[in-house]
Amino acid sequence: MVFDSLLSLIGRSSKKEVVKTTSPSTVARHKVEKKKIPVSKLAKGMTVVELDRPWTEVPVMFQEITISTGKEIQLLQQYCQHVYIDHHSYTNIYTKQFLNRQQKADYAQHKVNPEEASQKLQEELPRARKTFERSQEHINKLLEDVLRDSKIDIEGSKQLVASCVDSILNNETALFWLSKIKHRDKYTAEHSVRVAILAIAFGKYLQLPRYELEQLGLCGMLHDVGKMKVPQHILNKSGPLSKDEFKLVKEHAMLGYVYLHEHGGISEQICSTAYNHHEQMNSKGYPRQISTEKLSKYDRIIAILDSYDAMISDRCYRNAIPPSKAISELYKGQGSQYDEELIHEFIQMVGIYPIGSLVELNNGQVGIVLSANPDNKLSPVVELITNKYRKPIKPIAINLAKGPKDAQGNPLKVKQTLADNQVNFDLEHLVRSVAA
């Protein structure tokens, strides 16, 4: 049932009616229709006509502002919880975003080519590997510094996130591929890097400007630093936590906020995301059970990505689940645990078979998803990495939408997605050798 709903969501027709809007030059000729929105949803081009407080309490020159820079958005997010915008500017913005995404989808639909996708991956992998390994080294040292209550190298974090942005803008599959390298006993550090990568990729999909991609990447990289302030024997416990132990674990959100806030050089938004990434839309999260309006766009995005990566990763107390099942769990939590609109966007981005996920074909071969086919969600482009006996082979890219067949003439299809622990060969060695 959930799978059918997901497929319906991902495969919904792109020919939905586009709302016609009045051009900015003629807005003044109409009576202003105000729309209340949380500041987390502000975007360039929106015209703010009223605040949730007097204009005199906010350092702006006029009692109306058409947003043109990211700094103006940050200013309003700093002083306000919600604002009222001219409805014409709101529909203009989201109509343009819809059309831009549709143009991208139409382009991708006609340009999916397995050889080209594989070639682009091979070109980016060596550069991405350097960035990935530097990120792993950096986050390990950073978490050690947090453990010792030392000052962290935030400038180093910013540089590495910028490198991740460069790689993802060039070819996001490369860092997703490298994210298959996982170690159960290094979860917190590796999870932080993976969430940063996911955050940048999701921000790219949402067509956020570069400075927001870098902010999101830093939010992902630093969201869990508070765990270094929790007794490690509790974090690494293989069995169920007691009520008191779980209470201590939940304190990591507050401890992370305090640490980041006190060590300077870090924006309030990044500090707040560490504090809020376990809050929920129904105000039943932790540590504060705060209301929805107080959760920024960054808080809501990291909450989704933190949960997703946690579910598809081995933990000391449980094994990972396949990405398709994790997507189903997120779908169930839309509107209650997670922002409904962002859940829809995330599912649209990753599809039924997320890029970088392992899949088993109906002939027993295993592959990693390179890209989706917009017109055929169940038939992605896959890089085959094993034969039918699950023995590693030199990677071969195939487009399942083109109807390739096995040696017996049977059409190849995805049988199921796999968790990383469901392959009985050295996945890390394979990924490193391909990225060499």
Image (tube, helix red, strand yellow):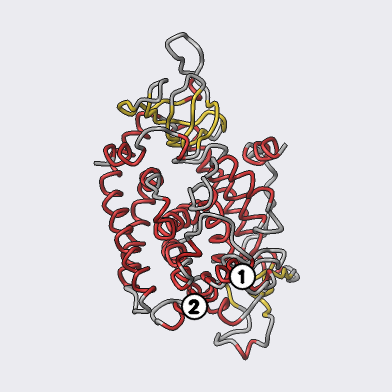
Q: Tell me the CA gap for discs 1 and 2.
A: 30 Å
Vertical side of 307 occupied by 75: above or below: below
Corner quadrant of residue 186: bottom left
Q: Nearer the viewer, residue 429 or 91?
A: 429
Q: Nearer the viewer, residue 124 or 396?
A: 396
- Mark 2 packing: few (<14 Cα in 10 Å), some, or many (20+)? few
- Mark 1 packing: few (<14 Cα in 10 Å), some, or many (20+)? few
Q: Name the residue at 37% across, 33% down.
A: 425
Residue 191 at x, y = what percent? Answer: 44, 56
Residue 423 at x, y = what percent? Answer: 43, 33
Residue 278 seen by the camera: yes
Q: Name the residue at 58% across, 45% down.
A: 326
Question: Which label was assigned to residue 268?
Answer: 2
Vertical side of 35 occupied by 201: above or below: above
Q: Nearer the viewer, residue 96 or 4?
A: 4
Residue 45 seen by the camera: no
Residue bearing mark 1: 244
Question: Which label was assigned to residue 204?
Answer: none
Q: Name the residue at 71% across, 70% down.
A: 36
Q: Do tag 1 and tag 2 residues touch (Cβ < 8 Å)?
A: no
Counting residues from the N terminus, which is met first, the one under dot 1 or under dot 2? 1
Vertical side of 11 occupied by 39: above or below: below
Q: Name the residue at 68% across, 53% down.
A: 333
- The amino acid type of the residue labelled 2 equals Glu
Viewer-side label of 1, 2: 1
**Quadrant location, the C terminus:** top left
- The amino acid type of the residue labelled 1 equals Asp
Residue 303 at x, y = what percent? Answer: 57, 60
| Disc 2 secondary structure class | helix
